[in-house]
Amino acid sequence: MPQPATRSHDDNAAALVMSRLDALARFSTDPDGLTRLYLTPEHRAAADQVAAWMREAGLAARIDGVGNVIGRYEGARPGLPALLLGSHIDTVRNAGKYDGCFGVIAAIAAISRLDAAGIRLNFAIEIIAFGDEEGVRFPVTLSGSRALAGTLDPAVLDATDENGVSLRAALAQFGSPGFEDPKRLAYRPGQALGYCELHIEQGPVLEAEDLPVGVVTAIAGAARHSVEVTGVAGHSGTVPMALRHDALCAASEMILAAERIARDTEELVATTGMIAARPGAVNVIAAGAKFSLDIRSASDAIRAQATRDIFAEFAAIAARRGTTVDIGKTYEAAAAPCARHLTDALEASVARHGIRPRRLPSGAGHDGLAMIALCPIAMLFVRCKGGISHNPAESITTADAGVAVDVLVDFLRHFDPEPAKG
């Protein structure tokens, strides 16, 4: 039965969330900033601290074979299927302290409140602190969530970091020796009712609309491409403009064409973050240029059509300028739509707290991209200052952290496991 809705904002609890995030940020390889990569000693120390906080909140905690911290809060009787909460505790280099970690610490705070009130629900709750969402140390990503979803390829154990350390060896150093089959860690069918993650928005929408939280509709699908343009080198002073085959100018026009198509297409973004020219001399027309292209949308159909349009423009530009263009795909992930019954439930919890519900997509990737292979997913965004993330300037307020925990507690007390079982 759903529990009665209550507005139980606890300023002390919200302050504790923020202080724990400060404490977690001290587990870093960088004494002057926050860098905590997967399976490093700093990751292990952070995982042990998170496990201790889970136990303090009334959960039984353990660290699994790929470095995930998993805490279980039993339901009204032992062994019930679980609703999964959480996020990741690894970071990018020179990171902010809220990306990922907030979702873990806020979930622990929510369970602590249930435990203090003696509340056991008709389902279990498990909090997961994933170890590898960012994919910074190894050329793989979402290792922890893919393992739990049963989709992690054992071949990733042979991947190596920049120092030549394999993932297999790093797991042994971390404390998971002899681990060979990631699929043995996966949840069995029916064990997981759903996955819900609290996360900072990493964008400016909620701040612009003066809203503390928002309900995510989908995690955008993304594809990354490497684009290489080939022209003809020549002397910068002797080749007339009309007779040039300038690869860099062609690449520049292509980048602007991708931007124009993205601007004209709803629910689509396109980004070029890297460009290089060769031979790279101030007085030489570029014979070659290479650039990256990242295309994202919450709709795979919209992304696919826009990609076709962009590539058609690239071909036309290359032909007009007397150059050639070669495009290679380096990464692709399908969009992950959030489950309607979970987003509706989150929206109802937001409304019960007197906040205008706002639905919005996530342009950034999250562990939900992997977890959707296991169970329905949902996300609640929290406003962040300036939309800044992956940056030491990343910031949220104590008040917004408290609202997010309140909404999560309300969501848990009203959660109906039956739609997930169906």
Image (cartoon, grey):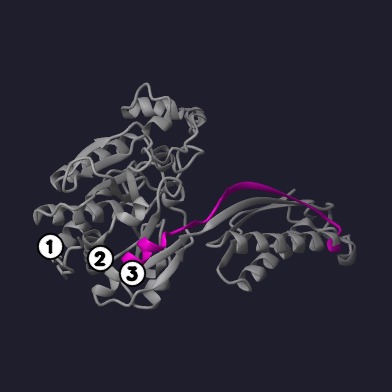
* Residue that carries the numbered disc 2 in the rendered image: 407
* Residue that carries the numbered disc 1 in the rendered image: 12
Q: Earlier in the sequence, mark 1 or mark 3?
A: 1
Q: Earlier in the sequence, mark 2 or mark 3?
A: 3
Q: What segment is highlighted magenta in the picture?
A: 320-346
User: In the rendered structure, which amino acid carries the disc numbered 2?
Assistant: Val
* Residue that carries the numbered disc 3 in the rendered image: 347
- In the image, residue 123 sits, relative to residue 154, either above or below, namely below
User: In the rendered structure, which amino acid carries the disc numbered 3?
Assistant: Glu
Q: Nearer the viewer, mark 1 or mark 3?
A: 3
Q: Secondary structure at mark 1?
A: helix
Q: Nearer the viewer, residue 117 or 294?
A: 117
- Asked whether the residues under the numbered discs 2 and 3 touch, taking CB atoms below 8 Å apart as contact, a structural biologist would say no
Q: Nearer the viewer, mark 1 or mark 2?
A: 2
Indicate the position of residue 229 as horizontal and vertical percent values: 76, 53
Q: Residue at x 31, y 55 (%)?
A: 418
User: In the rendered structure, which amino acid carries the disc numbered 1?
Assistant: Asn
How far, Cα to Cα, is label 2 from label 3?
A: 9 Å
Indicate the position of residue 81 as horizontal and vertical percent values: 28, 45
Q: Residues within 10 Å of mark 2 (few under 14, many from 20)?
A: many
Q: Secondary structure at mark 2?
A: helix
How far, Cα to Cα, is label 1 from label 3?
A: 25 Å
Q: Residues within 10 Å of mark 1 (few under 14, many from 20)?
A: few
- Asked whether the residues under the numbered discs 1 and 2 touch, taking CB atoms below 8 Å apart as contact, a structural biologist would say no
Q: Residue at x 28, y 35 (%)?
A: 63
How far, Cα to Cα, is label 1 from label 2?
A: 16 Å
Asked where in the image residue 1 lies, by quadrant, the reply is bottom left
